[in-house]
């Protein structure tokens, strides 16, 4: 994290921000390796591509089902408590998964059940975590703060993927899953110290359904928001299928196994670190236009796996993709921070996450049958084409092209007034 000339933390890096960054680094280290370990645990147990897809889908399906409830709960209860409870559940499920693999001969339904428990925890954690992070930053340096946070997290993912792939190859997937369980335990301890006193208490009444309806009105009232979420519903689905199912299979058949695939994922992580470093200095005025243009390279890894290219070329492709996608990620977080009232951050994050992952279980479950029906290269080319089409379509939304960065952060009741001033600056209706 950058420091001031006196050696102290910069003004935007407060206590909550520092705790959130440290805990995200810990969990990213463990989870990046665990993704590789879970896929190879299935393959080493005698499973095939369809089985890998089923285990991945078993994690994502409850994530989708519980996201909206998790967002409403996180805007009503102290967000750090929701985060800690979710981390404890993730710790337990990964520890049981590790024990199962280390004991030998894990059954498919066991792995699917434990993956589903992990997805349930993630469904409650993600909206609370994003809302907590967005509310922990103030002022004009929000974009830089998000870039530094993502740089730290992605740097940890880089190391976790490389280390995880190597550990799977040397000592097997069970120990990598055990390390991930330990990482969740450490992160839960750090997040227990988060301070939520700056967040105004919610007024009683309304109930869960009313909260969800209010969040839905906020979500559908912003074309840039739902347009990009729809885009990523398709993009994340096909990229998730390529990474979770086709990537390990191509690595096994053409690249030499888990090590090269882990290295390729590490290069993607390196690209995201470079992209985040770039965004600590670069402040594009048209946030979403620049960010969306940088989503097109997300099609490149699927195309590279379809060829398939040598491991060195795949690593280069993943590096470029990581840089461009991170430009989008920081721009997206800055837009949410700028446009969404604080008391609705977790619900909007929940709808964002829900739309972004809603099709992932279906895509991962269908990845194996698609390979059987069309062939692996054809399925991968289809993944690449869908990313390009979805990204081109979202550029047709005027607000995506026109939403501009503002110098003053907007929260709570001032959002509507700031929206009026934004309208004067850019010729679009409403708040984005």
Image: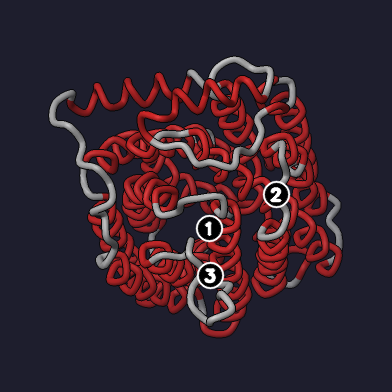
Residue 109 in sight: yes
Element class at badge 1: loop
Distance of mark 3 from mark 1, alpha carbons? 19 Å
The quarter of the picture where residue 428 lies is top right
Q: Quadrant of residue 292?
A: top right
Q: Nearer the viewer, residue 268 or 55?
A: 268
Say what secondary structure mark 3 lies in. helix
Total label count?
3
Residue at screen point 77% across, 34% down:
388
Vertical side of 101 occupied by 393: above or below: above
Neighbourhood count class around disc 1 (C-alpha, 10 Å): few under 14, some 14–19, many 20 upward? some
| Spatial CA span between label 2 and label 3 | 32 Å
- Disc 2 or disc 1, which is closer to the eye? 2
Residue 120 at x, y percent in the picture: 33, 48
Viewed as shown, does residue 355 lie left or right of 136?
right
The residue tagged 2 is 283
Q: Residue 333: x, y in percent? A: 55, 45
Q: Which residue is mark 1?
A: 47
Residue 422's place in the image compared with 409, above or below, is above
Tell me which residue sits at (22%, 28%) in the image.
208
Q: Residue at point 47% right, 75% down? A: 176
Q: Earlier in the sequence, mark 2 or mark 1?
A: 1
* Disc nearer the start of the sequence (2/3): 3
Q: Residue at (52%, 24%) from the top-left corner?
A: 419
Q: Quadrant of residue 282?
A: bottom right
Q: To which residue does mark 3 refer?
A: 33
The quadrant of the image that shows the C terminus is top right
């Amino acid at each position: 994290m950058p420091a001031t000339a006196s050696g102290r933390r910069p003004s935007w890096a407060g206590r909550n921000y520092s705790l959130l960054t440290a805990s995200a680094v810990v969990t990213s280290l463990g989870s990046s390796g665990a993704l590789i370990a879970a896929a190879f645990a299935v393959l080493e147990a005698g499973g095939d591509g369809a089985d890998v897809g089923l285990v991945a889908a078993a994690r994502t399906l409850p994530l989708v089902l519980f996201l909206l409830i998790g967002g409403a709960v996180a805007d009503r209860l102290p967000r750090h408590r929701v985060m800690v409870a979710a981390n404890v559940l993730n710790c337990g499920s990964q520890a049981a998964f590790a024990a199962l693999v280390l004991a030998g001969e894990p059954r498919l339904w066991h792995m699917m059940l434990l993956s589903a428990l992990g997805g349930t925890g993630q469904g409650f954690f993600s909206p609370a975590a994003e809302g907590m992070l967005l509310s922990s930053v103030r002022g004009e340096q929000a974009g830089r703060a998000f870039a530094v946070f993502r740089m730290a997290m992605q740097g940890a993912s880089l190391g976790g993927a490389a280390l995880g792939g190597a550990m799977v190859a040397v000592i097997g997937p069970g120990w990598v899953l055990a390390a991930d369980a330990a990482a969740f335990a450490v992160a839960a301890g750090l997040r227990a110290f988060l301070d939520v006193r700056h967040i105004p208490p919610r007024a009683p009444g309304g109930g869960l359904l009313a909260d969800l309806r209010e969040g839905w009105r906020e979500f559908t009232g912003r074309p840039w928001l739902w347009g990009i979420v729809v885009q990523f519903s398709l993009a994340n689905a096909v990229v998730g299928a390529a990474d979770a199912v086709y990537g390990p299979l191509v690595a096994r058949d053409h690249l030499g196994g888990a090590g090269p695939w882990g290295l390729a994922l590490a290069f993607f992580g390196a690209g995201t670190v470079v992209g985040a470093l770039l965004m600590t200095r670069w402040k594009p005025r048209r946030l979403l236009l620049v960010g969306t243009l940088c989503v097109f390279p997300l099609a490149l890894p699927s195309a590279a796996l379809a060829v398939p290219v040598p491991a060195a070329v795949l690593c280069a492709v993943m590096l470029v993709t990581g840089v461009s996608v991170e430009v989008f990620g920081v721009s997206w977080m800055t837009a949410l921070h700028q446009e969404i009232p604080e008391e609705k951050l977790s619900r909007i994050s929940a709808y964002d996450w829900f739309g972004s992952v809603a099709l992932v279980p279906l895509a991962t479950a269908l990845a194996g049958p698609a390979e059987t029906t069309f062939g692996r290269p054809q399925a991968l080319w289809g993944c690449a084409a869908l990313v390009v089409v979805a990204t081109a379509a979202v550029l047709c939304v005027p607000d995506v092209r026109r939403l501009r960065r503002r110098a003053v952060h907007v929260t709570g009741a001032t959002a509507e007034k700031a929206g009026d001033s934004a309208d004067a600056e850019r010729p679009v209706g409403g708040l984005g």
